[in-house]
Amino acid sequence: MTDTHVSRVRMTGISKRYGALQSLDNVSLDLKPGEVLGLVGDNGAGKSTISKVLSGAVIPDAGTIEIDGKHVAFTSPADARAARIEMVYQDLALCDTIDVAGNLFLGREPKRRVAGVPMLDKKLMHERARDMLSNLGIVIPDTRMKVENLSGGQRQSIAIGRAASFNPSVLIMDEPTAALAVAEVEAVLELIRTVSQRGVSVILITHRLQDLFLVCDRIQVMYEGRNVAERRIEDTNIEDVVNLIVGRKFAARSAGHNREKGASA
Amino acid sequence: MSSEPNAYASHPPRMREATILDKVVANGGVMSIALFFIVCCLFFSVTTDAFLTAPNLLNVIRQSAPLLIVAAAMTFVITTGGIDLSVGSVLALTATLSAAALQAGVPWPLAILLMLLLGGVIGVIQGYFIAYERIPAFIVTLAGLSVIRGFALLITGGYSIPIEPTSPFVALGRAWILGIPAPALIAIVILAVAYIAFNETHFGRYVTGVGANAEATRRAGVNTRSVILWVYVLSGTAAAAAGVILSARLGSGSSNAGQGFELDVIAAVVLGGTSLFGGRGSLTGTILGALTVAVLANGLILSHLSPFFTPIVTGFIILVAIWLNFRLFRGGAKGR
């Protein structure tokens, strides 16, 4: 799937500054249909910010985004969602006091009309929520439970289920496995494989490097708001990726900095 | 290494579907105020002869109609995590202006419409500063409380403006339709609409969403700012309706009407289990909260006790009801 020539996503020269902090500095990102890209880097490297730019939650100061070859400018998450870009946020973005089905459908609740007045179709919502969850192999006993009463792993599953169930063309996952039990991690990785085989492009942000080698086609490393390296998964190993993330090589051989960057670009 | 087959043997699932008891605990706020309401009603039924009579109960609803109407709108405001302190002032302004408009010869239906519109416009202005300029609701509506009351005083010079008792306008506050007082009827209709809007519509869902996790709701593609603006339009319009009903019932518009009204409204909403932190609201609770406050005031008077006991008892009940939420129904009040 990855040898297609038109990129699903092409971000070029993205920059974003928060006050004194240059959060993103001329970052580029390329994603092909059905490709799974691992985005790694230390805390504050800009992984979350670049993914929020793609999902419309952060508006960049500079740079261009192309989706399937067409130039786009997102001004809100709704724009990105219209372009079928879905994101699972690190902080889950769930409403604690709303039930499971309500969270799955937040912002796109099915309507029914009672005497011409649009209302929530709660019955349909709960039915479809049950189907969505069981298709993804997520076990929640009752879709009427409030999310605040669920475990961390269950909450994560709801967040992923929400993003994956609406036929996305790009799925961005920010630390999807961080709070999960061992079996749940396996289920999520399996889910990533399944959706990418259906042609969905996936961006996976994670600190669990072993996960990258199980699902990713390619790894992009960020360091202090810049792209520093890119590796095909078969050309690299955990040790290499760790070195790239902590930037030890760059610090030790500052003279070779440009050469290394050039070689990896 | 020995395996431990027993440890992995199947066992009953640890999660179960919600039982009735779970639901009772989850709705702790409503349950504790329902308890208070029933206790109050029983107490006054036993201690006084006049309390449990149809005319008295209808009178309670008639008098508490403004409170019920504004409390319903305030439930939306507080569920978004906001507050509207200006409702008492809006009530006073619309009460005086409707009297003034009638005196100036404005036809009564137009006067009512203008007052509701005025309440809505005040809501738009306050909502704009809260939703789009991100100024805390407390500050915006505190300023509104002062400014709007000031306008009411300025217009009337501090006097109350009489309304012609023959005007059909006063029917709004005094008429009886099918054996039910008109204000009570209006309140019941508004409460029913509010209940449906809160629980069954997209707007109500987004009001809860904004209060629970505004950022998540925004990311889900909801225009959270417009949701916030609209709840203040609702509370402004509801306060205007309350002002119209009050002036119609009293037959005059006084700029001193509704002093401290906003606190009664907030008390009723909070008594009903709606969280001041947002995300958790109940219209059933609000209705029970408002009625409890009204029944207390009525019952204490019927018991020939000083009416000045009302604020004392109300205050204690607020504290105890919220305390019950935290202790007895801990599940429902989790993290709050």
Image (spheres, grey):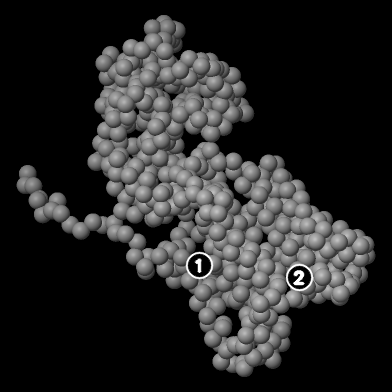
Quarter of the view holding residue B117: bottom right
Quarter of the view holding residue A36: top left
- Judge left or right: residue B268 versus residue A110: right
Which sits in the foreground, A162 or A41? Answer: A162
Q: Residue at x 44, y 33 (%)?
A: A87
Q: Amino acid at mark 1?
A: Gly
Q: Residue at x 62, y 71 (%)?
A: B290
Q: Which chain contains the residue that carries disc 1? A: B
Extreme left residue here?
Answer: B2
Residue A23 image position (x, y, % from top left): 54, 25
Residue A139 image position (x, y, % from top left): 29, 47
Q: Residue at x 83, y 60 (%)?
A: B111
Q: Residue at x 66, y 71 (%)?
A: B185
Residue B334 numbered tag: none
Residue B118 image position (x, y, % from top left): 79, 54
Which sits in the foreground, A40 or B80? Answer: B80
Front disc: 1 or 2: 2
- Judge left or right: residue A154 versus residue B215: left
Q: State whether residue B42 is above or below residue A249.
A: below
Q: Amino acid at mark 2?
A: Leu
Residue B29 numbered tag: 1
Q: Which quadrant is home to the N terminus of chain A?
A: top left
Q: Which quadrant is home to the C terminus of chain A?
A: top left
Residue A145 image position (x, y, % from top left): 39, 55
Q: Which chain contains the residue that carries disc 2? A: B
Cα separation between marks 1 and 2: 33 Å
> Is tag 1's residue or tag 2's residue first in the polypeptide sequence?
1
Residue B172 numbered tag: 2
